[in-house]
Amino acid sequence: MSRAQTDSGEATILEIQRMSTEDGPGIRTTVFFKGCSLQCSWCHNPESIARQPQLHWVGNRCIGCRTCLETCRHQVLTLTETGMVIDRTRCQACGDCAEACPSTALELMGKKWTLDDLVSEVIKDKAYFDRSGGGITISGGEPALQSEFATGFLRALKNRGIQTALDTCGLCSRKALESVLPFTTMVLFDLKILDPIKHQKLTGSSNEKILSNLLFTADFIKSHVHPKILWIRTPIIPGATDSEENIHAIGQYIAKNLSTLPERWELCAFNNLCQDKYHRLDIPWAFAEVELMRQSDMEHLADIARKSGVNPDMVHWSGSTRLESETVHNRPSLKAVNNCGIGS
């Protein structure tokens, strides 16, 4: 078993998000697995990157009782006038302080779940899935890094008649895909940047394996009963992925290699609501001052996508945008973004 793998009976889960309408059709419950194979500079969920649980402090909940300081066996917490300081070089993420905190100001992000417990938890929402045509999406992070557990989880849901989806960045082993895919109804596959050098600079990895896995997934869908549906998703990040050249290149790649197989190509507008997450994890964020996309920009890029050679009906865009009257500023150059990675 590889180091990226976990025992099939237990996995590290970041969050269970109910009533989601963004991770596939209908009303869905999204299970976020902790640990990612990419380190995207713009990541909206930085707490999902590291595999191990992480401690963070929510200042507006703190009542200053210092229970956490007394509880911490490793003495890694210091409460100052400006907030809680966590010595992350010594923190064991044991969770004792979070469990003792009466106001939930300290939280441990990442929890071990057994397969049976996780299945029992998510099937509580089955009535919503049945009425809306929804289901359960496994996301992350990268759920395929915990493929043995993910496979068992999806198999159990399929046996209960629940529709499932795999949301993947594509950077995983071929063996992991072969294990997970037969138990998924659909695949949401990210294509962020087609240029391999830019992809390396902005995500920490080349896209060679990602593209290879996309082609494998497409062939798998054609030759198997499940999965049945493929969606392509591209995050639209100012100064990083939002160039006409990148969108046109991705569209040409889809048209040439996937033809009409994808049911949907979704352009997902940049979200800057994650700033507090970076602050709580003591991680600098290259996009902290970057504004939302304008609606006109998203519509323009969608038009570029529709003219790239794909079926224009498959192109959609989603996400919040800013008012057209707002002035564009603090939009980083690609060079500036390239020099700022996660945790640097």
Image (tube, grey):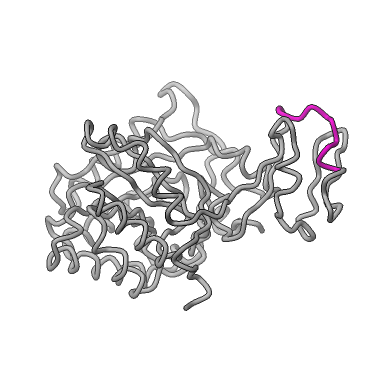
One can see residue 245 in this view: no
Q: Please check the rendered image and state whether residue 62 is part of the magenta-colored stretch, yes or no.
A: yes
Residue 208 lies left or right of residue 130; in this view the side is right
44 and 77: which is toward the camera: 77
Residue 315 lies left or right of residue 205; in this view the side is left
Taking 49 as reference, is 132 above or below it? above
For the point 21% across and 47% down, the residue is 264
For the point 19% across and 68% down, the residue is 220
Residue 151 lies left or right of residue 331; in this view the side is left
Taking 301 as reference, is 75 above or below it? below
Taking 3 as reference, is 265 above or below it? above
For the C terminus, the quadrant is bottom right
Image coordinates of residue 27 in percent, x first then y, are 30, 34
Using the rendered view, name the quadrant where residue 211 is placed.
bottom left
Q: Please check the rendered image and state whether residue 111 is part of the magenta-colored stretch, yes or no.
A: no
Using the rendered view, name the quadrant where residue 176 is placed.
bottom left
For the point 48% across and 68% down, the residue is 7
Image coordinates of residue 137 in percent, x first then y, are 34, 48
3 and 141: which is toward the camera: 3
| Residue stretch rendered in magenta on the structure | 60-69
85 and 284: which is toward the camera: 85
Image coordinates of residue 324 in percent, x first then y, are 40, 24
- Count of residue discs: 0
For the point 44% across and 27% down, the residue is 322
242 and 94: which is toward the camera: 94
Q: Which residue of the protein is positioned furthest toward the bottom in this rendering?
A: 1
Taking 135 as reference, is 217 above or below it? below
One can see residue 219 in this view: yes
Using the rendered view, name the quadrant where residue 26 is placed.
top left
Image coordinates of residue 77 in percent, x first then y, are 83, 47
